[in-house]
Image (cartoon, rainbow, N blue to C red):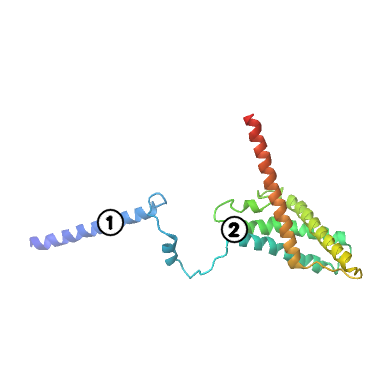
Amino acid sequence: MSKKRQKPVEEKKSTAEYYKLHKKAVEDLVSADESNSPKVSEAELRKYRSGTRKFKFAPWFKVVFVKFWFPAAVCFFFIWGLSAYVSNMLDLLAATGIALGMVTDLLTNNVLRFFESKEGENSRFMMFPKKGYLSFPLNILYSWVVLFLVFTLYNVINGAIVAVTQVTDQVPLGVEPILFGLFYLGFDTLLIEAKHLLKRIVSDAVKTTKRG
């Protein structure tokens, strides 16, 4: 009789220890962070991820592609699409500049932020990285500047070709999305790098003044 009583007691004790053990495991899992977790290599983590990712685009390639593709798309829909309806070139460029500024503020910059592995990582690729009411009109003004530089380059290239070939009855290099996107990307990159350079020069000058 004593053995029969002892067996249920032992079962209850083992069940309590079982739940206590698993409760502790759950608490450890909930409280886990980088400070109290063992380091696991990227190769080991890759084994347990869903799917097989054999190829991964570099972050810089994503930035370059996004900043090329959106201006190329604007060229396709506005410069090509509206040229049949808007005869005045200045009006066409004004509308295109507005579209480029809107796309930059609403699409390009937000896509770059989406690609970030940490907040602010891609801010260096934006002329106006801070989101706000002013970024919208500033991006439109900036797009007009870049657009002016792009069409100036087209005119310089066409002028040089005409000077060499002496053919004046046609435009040697017309505006098309791919080359337009590359030109826009090039001037955009140059202006952003110039901004960073100017900021470094001013920062160094301020530090030198404080030391002196």
| Tag 2 near tag 1, CB within 8 Å | no
Label 2 residue SS: helix
Residue 116: tell me if it is visible: yes
- Of circles 2 and 1, the one toward us is 2
Image position, residue 187 (x, y; %): 74, 56
- Foreground of the two, 174 or 112: 174
Residue 48: tell me if it is visible: no
Q: In this view, does 53 lie to the left or right of 163?
A: left
- Report the amino acid beneath label 1: Leu
Disc 1: CA contacts within 10 A as few (<14), some (14-19) or many (>=20): few
Quickly name the residue at label 2.
114
Residue that appears at 81% across and 56% down: 148
Label placed on residue 88: none
Q: In this view, does 168 lie to the left or right of 177?
A: right
Quarter location, residue 206: top right
Sequence order check, earlier mark of 2 and 1: 1
Image position, residue 147 (x, y; %): 79, 57
Q: In this view, does 6 lie to the left or right of 111?
A: left
- Quadrant (top left/top right/bottom left/bottom right) for the C terminus: top right
- Quadrant (top left/top right/bottom left/bottom right) for the N terminus: bottom left
- As drawn, the residue found furthest toward the front would be 164
Residue that appears at 81% across and 59% down: 153
- As drawn, the residue found furthest toward the top would be 212
Quickly name the residue at label 1.
21
- Foreground of the two, 197 or 17: 197
Q: Residues under labels 2 and 1: Cα distance?
A: 41 Å
Label 1 residue SS: helix
Image position, residue 158 (x, y; %): 85, 64
Image position, residue 54 (x, y; %): 51, 70
- Report the amino acid beneath label 2: Phe
Disc 2: CA contacts within 10 A as few (<14), some (14-19) or many (>=20): few
